[in-house]
Amino acid sequence: MTRLIRLRGVLMTVLIVFGGTTLSAHDFWIEPPAFQTRPGALVGLHLMVGERMLGDAIPRDTAGIERFVVARDAQEQPVPGREGGDPAGVLRVDGAGLLIVGYHSRPHAIELTADKFEKYLGEEGLDAVQAILARMKRKPAVAREQFSRCAKSLLSSGATSVAERDRAIGLPLELVADRNPYALAGTQPDFPVTLLYRGKPLRDALVIAINRDDPDGRLRARTDRDGRVSFRLPRSGVWLIKAVHMIPAESGHDVDWESFWASLTFELRAAGAPAAGS
């Protein structure tokens, strides 16, 4: 049985990395069974790949993980898990408060035809890369890209407060929520988010917010000079916020482009619903 699980994990990794151009553009996010939990609970953390907040869980592949951690207050510790297992990580909730889960994958290489690469750039709002291609006298027939995933998830354990905030944990491309979603309730709350690249604000990047119950009603905004956007979230439920950043690869590499895919998941409780731990 263990051998079968490991084989499944290897096959899924191969499909994700080499399984065609559509998979390269799928979203990647962290999803627990419940975003609001309690101290002492054991929480499984699924690594999901898909679209419209629907997808498949990816088994744990230690060789593909650069970093998988959970932070609370000033403390940070690695997220353990069984090789080839799903959930990919298991978190023992140690105390009350806001929990920040972060995942950074090692880079994977893919190749896309020019047409599919152009479509992908348009979907993710990568205007700067499109401008570089437009200036080329001769565009390559194939785009060679190296990408890595930078996913975060915010969980709440027990009672929480407005004073508790998300914070940067050092992912190459990172979305940081400027308000605690578990201290908010009701429709249309302002939810500001900051996008950081290598720890510095990234301006003019497209950020997209998707609600699981209404994936077609996605919200879009571009970051300002401080790397910030603010969404008016129209409904409660599970949210995925995502962004992509791409740069030309350094000379001497076997790829033309290097990209980073950031995601942030959390749950916004409905108006009148009790806060976690109450």
Image (cartoon, rainbow, N blue to C red):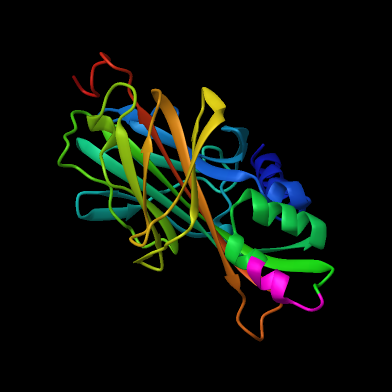
The overriding secondary structure of the stretch rendered in magenta is: helix
Numbered range of the magenta stretch? 131-138
Q: Is any atom of residue 159 visible in this view?
A: yes
The quadrant the N terminus occupies is: top right
Q: Where residue 139 sits: x, y (%)?
A: 80, 72
Q: Nearer the viewer, residue 255 or 71?
A: 255
Q: Is residue 216 left or right of residue 242?
A: right
Q: Where residue 83 sits: x, y (%)?
A: 56, 48
Q: Please tell me which residue is depicted at 71% across the width and 77% down the height of the picture.
A: 254
Q: Please tell me which residue is depicted at 73% across the width and 68% down the height of the picture.
A: 144
In the displayed structure, would residue 143 be above or below residue 102?
A: below
Q: Nearer the viewer, residue 55 or 218?
A: 218
Q: How many marks?
A: 0
Figure quadrant of residue 191: top left
Q: Nearer the viewer, residue 238 or 128?
A: 128
Q: Where residue 77 sits: x, y (%)?
A: 31, 54
Per the image, is 3 magenta?
A: no
Q: Is residue 191 left or right of residue 142?
A: left
Q: Please tell me which residue is depicted at 26% across the width and 38% down the height of the picture.
A: 180
Q: Residue furthest top?
A: 272
Q: Please tell me which residue is depicted at 45% across the width and 28% down the height of the picture.
A: 33
In the displayed structure, would residue 266 be above or below residue 120?
A: above
Q: Nearer the viewer, residue 168 or 10?
A: 168
Per the image, is 133 magenta?
A: yes
The quadrant the C terminus occupies is: top left
Q: Is any atom of residue 45 visible in this view?
A: no
Q: Where residue 155 sits: x, y (%)?
A: 33, 36
